[in-house]
Image (cartoon, rainbow, N blue to C red):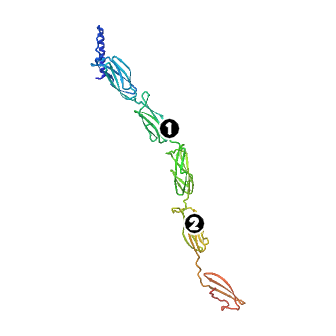
């Protein structure tokens, strides 16, 4: 049977007893003596026996003294507690009331009712719990930060009356960790441009803060190396570093590359420069309207050697020989577009023009040199005289003797020698007249011309 029911029954019996006593006293000259309550009190009962209250909250207790038969007995009652306090005690109709107020400590608290006299006691157990969190707020409720910067948030817990609660566990979370991260103390670290919502949760209640993250403005762009010297066909990787106003490097920024002289050098989207021809070019890296440059100087691959072909040549006087000079790099690769100068060590024997054509002038030898960018190669030319002419008997034909009245004659003849035809006139004087058998005209063969 519930205690409250039994208590109500006992209180009803007490009221009936009081009415009977009142009637007896009115009918008798001498009042009826009541049984000594001290000897008849069996126990003091406290209600409720167990209760749970938040810290700093109040709850009412009631204590009554009962006889062994369950009747209420008038008895003084005092209260004691192991934590908190009992205030505003009162007594009415054999019932003793105590208003208990929990302290700030949590846990089990004993509320004890002491019957006086007699020393009978009863104890109720109060479980003191923290005041439940009714609301959570975050301060600041919104923040704008730059990438890489931090923002400290603070969470405050409140009870239903709007009182600040302390010592409560708060759990932090970010709705977009790719934009911003938050640690267990509410420190937000920005990661990338964008927005995120930070949540603070305590005992099922939560508060939020909005975080907006933007990129740090690019104040300058540094290009490394700032200068580079290349040879034709070579490459150079350039690195562009955007920086903020304090000179701190910035990451994740878009870089565009341009070239002032594409005929000399090229540059791709990652800053790789290729050397195309001798000359100079300026490479520019631009990010968010800011730019930096690098100066590129391109030169031809150095000539390491010069090969002359043929390396030797044999000519006769009056003959020619075309020589070819090939400049080469250190790896033996042929180089084109290089200036070649030709010289002869003995121009009396052999001459050479600007294209390497050798002319044989006289018997002997000469060294022909081809030079390019300080390197040279040579060819040896040997010149010989032409073979001597072939000897053959001379013949005189068509000899005509013209007679005169004096003692002289004139001889006219043609001399054939070594295949070369020439006419020679000779005059001979004779002291006497001579006629040929053919009437003054005769033919004579001469062996010596």
| Farthest left residue in view | 69
Q: Residues within 10 Å of mark 1 (few under 14, many from 20)?
A: some
The residue tagged 2 is 370
The answer to whether residue 303 is above or below residue 228 is below
The residue tagged 1 is 144
* Residue 240: x %, y % from top left: 52, 48
The answer to whether residue 119 is above or below residue 338 is above
| Farthest right residue in view | 406
Q: Is residue 206 left or right of residue 290?
A: left
Report helix, strand or loop for mark 1.
strand
**Quick check: can you spot residue 263?**
no
73 and 156: which is toward the camera: 73
Q: Verify CB contact (< 8 Å) between mark 1 and mark 2.
A: no
Q: CA distance from mark 1 to mark 2?
A: 73 Å
The answer to whether residue 125 is above or below residue 247 is above
170 and 97: which is toward the camera: 97
| Farthest top residue in view | 29
In the picture, residue 383 is in which quadrant? Answer: bottom right
Per the rendering, the mark at residue 244 is none
Q: For the point 54% across and 48% down, which residue is it? A: 222
């Amino acid at each position: 049977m519930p205690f409250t029911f039994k208590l109500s029954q006992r209180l009803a019996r007490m009221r009936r007893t009081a009415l009977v006593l009142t009637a007896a006293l009115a009918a008798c000259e001498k009042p009826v003596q009541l049984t000594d309550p001290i000897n008849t009190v069996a126990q003091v009962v406290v209600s409720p026996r167990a209760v749970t209250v938040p810290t700093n909250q109040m709850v009412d207790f009631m204590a009554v003294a009962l006889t062994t038969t369950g009747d209420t007995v008038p008895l003084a009652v005092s209260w004691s507690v192991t934590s908190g306090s009992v205030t505003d005690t009162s007594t009415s109709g054999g019932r003793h009331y105590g208003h208990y107020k929990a302290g700030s400590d949590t846990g089990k608290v004993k509320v004890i009712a002491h019957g006086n006299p007699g020393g009978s006691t009863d104890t109720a157990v109060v479980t003191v719990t923290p005041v439940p969190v009714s609301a959570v707020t975050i301060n600041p409720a919104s923040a704008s930060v730059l990438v890489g910067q931090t923002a400290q948030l603070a969470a405050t817990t409140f009870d239903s009356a709007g009182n600040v609660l302390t010592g409560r566990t708060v759990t932090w979370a970010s709705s977009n960790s790719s934009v911003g991260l938050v640690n267990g103390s509410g420190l937000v670290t920005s990661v990338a441009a964008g927005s995120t919502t930070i949540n603070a949760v305590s005992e099922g209640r939560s508060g939020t803060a909005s975080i907006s993250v933007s990129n740090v403005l690019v104040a300058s762009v540094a290009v490394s190396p700032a200068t580079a010297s290349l040879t034709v066909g070579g490459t150079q990787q350039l690195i562009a570093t955007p920086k903020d106003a304090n000179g701190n490097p910035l990451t994740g920024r878009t870089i565009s590359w341009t070239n002032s002289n594409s005929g000399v050098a090229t540059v791709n989207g990652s800053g790789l420069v290729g050397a195309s021809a001798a000359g100079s070019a300026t490479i520019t890296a631009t990010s968010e309207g800011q730019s930096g440059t690098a100066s590129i100087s391109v030169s031809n691959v150095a000539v390491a050697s010069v090969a002359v072909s043929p390396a030797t040549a044999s000519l006769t006087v009056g003959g020619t020989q075309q020589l070819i000079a090939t400049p080469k790099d250190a790896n033996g690769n042929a180089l084109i577009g290089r200036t070649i100068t030709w010289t002869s060590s003995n121009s009396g024997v052999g001459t050479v023009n600007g294209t390497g054509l050798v002319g044989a002038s006289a018997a002997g030898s000469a060294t022909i040199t081809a030079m390019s960018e300080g390197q040279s190669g040579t060819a040896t030319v040997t010149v010989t005289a032409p073979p001597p002419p072939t000897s053959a008997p001379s013949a005189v034909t068509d000899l005509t003797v013209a007679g005169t009245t004096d003692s002289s004659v004139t001889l006219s003849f043609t001399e054939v020698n070594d295949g070369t035809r020439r006419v020679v006139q000779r005059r001979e004087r004779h002291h006497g007249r001579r006629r040929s058998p053919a009437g003054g005209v005769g033919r004579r063969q001469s062996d010596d011309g």
